[in-house]
């Protein structure tokens, strides 16, 4: 590994050392990154990825941190955040352009204000557009694959324009490789009645308030839903609602959410996830697969290390 220094970074790359990553996640858990880079355009993203590759450093994109658990030991690589123009949203006739760092719920609101329909399901997904594309995020029987028109993917060698088929999108999956970042995306949307769209969004928000924990530190769904069933139902049936390890607990509101107290550590959350999966298996249920991602100190963003 080549030793990295701030002075070795390109002049247009905003780079800092040793910053805590916990504030950049919704669960507010985790240690510091060796390096934190912020990029305001695709060219800066490519520069950051190339700088990291030249030093054999892993890269992790930290968006809204809504489905990310960071190790207590932090990250021995480059955490990358998208800012500036990469958070922009532009609504157009029958479509929308978004930067990869744009808020997906904000994009939904902008689409609704312009009478564009098809993206409403994203109102309850508190992440970035780039992250939503990378994991083919979905809710309320909708998903990104159904409305994605194109995406710009940046890597250390440059950028490429891709379509949905190129990304091999499936349930909570894309074929993006480590070191690749979605910096922009376009959506093909239909024309709709603005009042009807607003009513649908209000219904979705009401459903979320009624069925998911509010006003607490948490991330999105912990486990993906197995075919034909609900991870929340399986966890509740296995006695996991309000189950606590350390200062983390499965929510008493919805068992597929984990709430973090002020002293929560990532090890608490991982132990709780492992116990929930074990209990479901012991009850004859399926092996639950994590939807939340884990930032490993050395490997970058991976599936949480559960037994």
Image (cartoon, rainbow, N blue to C red):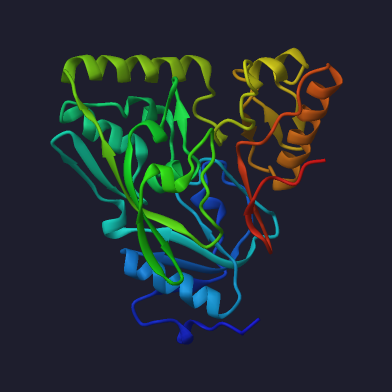
The location of residue 133, given as percent across then percent down, is: 43, 43
**Residue drawn at the location 42% of the way across and 28% of the way down:** 124
In the image, residue 48 above or below residue 128: below
**Residue drawn at the location 38% of the way across and 20% of the way down:** 205
Q: Decide if residue 161 is on the left or right side of residue 70.
A: left
For this rendering, which residue is in front, 260 or 97? 97
User: Could you tell me if residue 64 is visible in this image?
Assistant: no
**Residue drawn at the location 53% of the way across and 84% of the way down:** 5
Quarter-of-image position of residue 45: bottom left
Quarter-of-image position of residue 78: bottom right
Residue that protrudes farthest toward the left in the picture: 93
The location of residue 204, given as percent across then percent down, is: 38, 18
The location of residue 262, given as percent across then percent down, is: 63, 41
Location of the N terminus by quadrant is: bottom right
Q: Decide if residue 94 is on the left or right side of residue 185.
A: left
In the image, residue 44 above or below residue 167: below
Q: Decide if residue 141 is on the left or right side of residue 5.
A: left
In the image, residue 284 above or below residue 223: above
The location of residue 39, given as percent across then percent down, is: 37, 65
For this rendering, which residue is in front, 149 or 286? 149
**Residue drawn at the location 33% of the way across and 77% of the way down:** 12
User: Could you tell me if residue 256 is visible in this image?
Assistant: yes
Residue that protrudes farthest toward the right in the picture: 282
């Amino acid at each position: 590994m080549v030793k990295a220094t701030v002075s070795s970074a390109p002049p247009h790359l905003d780079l800092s050392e040793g910053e805590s990553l916990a504030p950049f996640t919704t669960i507010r858990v985790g240690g510091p990154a060796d390096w934190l880079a912020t990029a305001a355009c695709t060219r800066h993203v490519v520069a950051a990825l190339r700088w990291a590759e030249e030093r054999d450093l892993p890269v992790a994109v930290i968006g809204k941190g809504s489905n990310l658990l960071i190790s207590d030991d932090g990250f021995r690589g480059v955490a990358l955040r998208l800012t500036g123009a990469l958070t922009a949203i532009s609504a157009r006739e029958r479509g929308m352009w978004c930067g990869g760092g744009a808020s997906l719920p904000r994009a939904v609101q902008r689409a609704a204000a312009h009478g564009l329909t098809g993206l409403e399901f994203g109102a309850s997904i508190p992440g970035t557009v780039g992250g939503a594309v990378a994991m083919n995020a979905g809710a309320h029987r909708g998903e990104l694959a159904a409305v994605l028109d194109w995406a710009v993917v940046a890597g250390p060698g440059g950028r490429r324009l891709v379509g949905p088929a190129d990304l091999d999108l499936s349930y909570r999956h894309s074929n993006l490789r480590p070191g690749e970042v979605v910096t922009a995306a376009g959506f093909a949307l239909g024309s709709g009645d603005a009042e009807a769209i607003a009513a649908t969004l209000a219904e979705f928000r009401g459903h979320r308030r009624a069925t998911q924990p509010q006003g607490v530190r948490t991330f999105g769904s912990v486990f993906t839903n197995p075919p034909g069933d609900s991870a929340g139902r399986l966890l509740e049936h296995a006695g996991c609602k309000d189950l606590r390890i350390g200062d983390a607990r499965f929510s008493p509101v919805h068992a597929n959410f984990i709430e973090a107290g002020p002293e929560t550590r990532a090890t608490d959350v991982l132990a709780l996830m492992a116990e929930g999966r074990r209990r479901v298996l012991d009850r004859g249920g399926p092996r639950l697969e994590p939807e939340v991602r884990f930032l490993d100190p050395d490997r970058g963003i991976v599936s949480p290390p559960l037994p």
